[in-house]
Amino acid sequence: MKRIWAGWRMKYILGDKSGECVFCHALQSTDDASNLVLWRGERAAMMLNLYPYSNGHVLVVPYEHRGDLCSLQAETLTEMMFLTTKAIEILRSTMSPDGFNVGLNLGEAAGAGIQDHVHIHIVPRWENDTNFMPVLSDVRVMPEWLTDTYSKLRAALSEAAQQN
């Protein structure tokens, strides 16, 4: 039997989740690469999920720390949707997925891991990307390092900004 080690997950599993909001911390920092922040808008930002469902799992996060989507201003919601479409465009051009799961988990009952700071998930999907690992072993195999995905998407976003 072969084993796949995902030791990086233990930091999250056992880590203190009662402290500072991870999104607020990342967005207040100036070290975008360490915090996986891909793009900053006026009211929201794009960042990679540190614990992704698949490679290229992007989050769109408002700067405002709000747990209720309905409490965000229309301008923030508009920019969040613009960044969501931008993330899809960039993921299409750099990773060629066959589809996307796009959504929000609002509240613990809906599966929100971070309930107090609204965020949109953009998860690229490929045909036949589910194999026996998650089904039988509750393990997900990630085919690319997170830092490599970050570099690829960050470069594509910078190039797209120069063209506009």
Image (cartoon, rainbow, N blue to C red):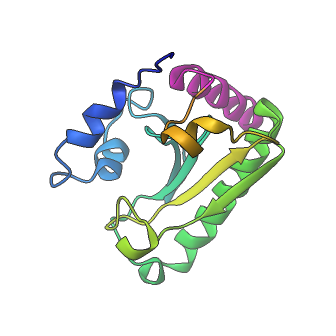
Q: Residue at x 58, y 45 (%)?
A: 135
Magenta range is: 143-164
Question: Which residue of the protein is positioned furthest toward the front in this rendering?
Answer: 1
* Residue 164 visible in the snapshot: no
Does the magenta portion include 147?
Answer: yes
Nearest the camera: 136 or 9?
A: 136
Above or below: residue 65 compared with residue 57: below
Above or below: residue 72 compared with residue 83: below
Give x and y (percent) for residue 86. Answer: 72, 50
Q: Residue at x 50, y 38 (%)?
A: 137
**Left or right of residue 44, residue 35 in this image:** left
Instruction: Specify the quadrant of the image occupied by residue 35.
Output: top left
Give x and y (percent) for residue 113. Answer: 37, 59
Nearest the camera: 65 or 139?
A: 139
**Left or right of residue 160, residue 122 in this image:** left
Above or below: residue 145 compared with residue 40: above
| Most common SS among magenta residues | helix
Instruction: Specify the quadrant of the image occupied by residue 149.
Output: top right
Give x and y (percent) for residue 123. Answer: 64, 49
Does the magenta portion include 163?
Answer: yes
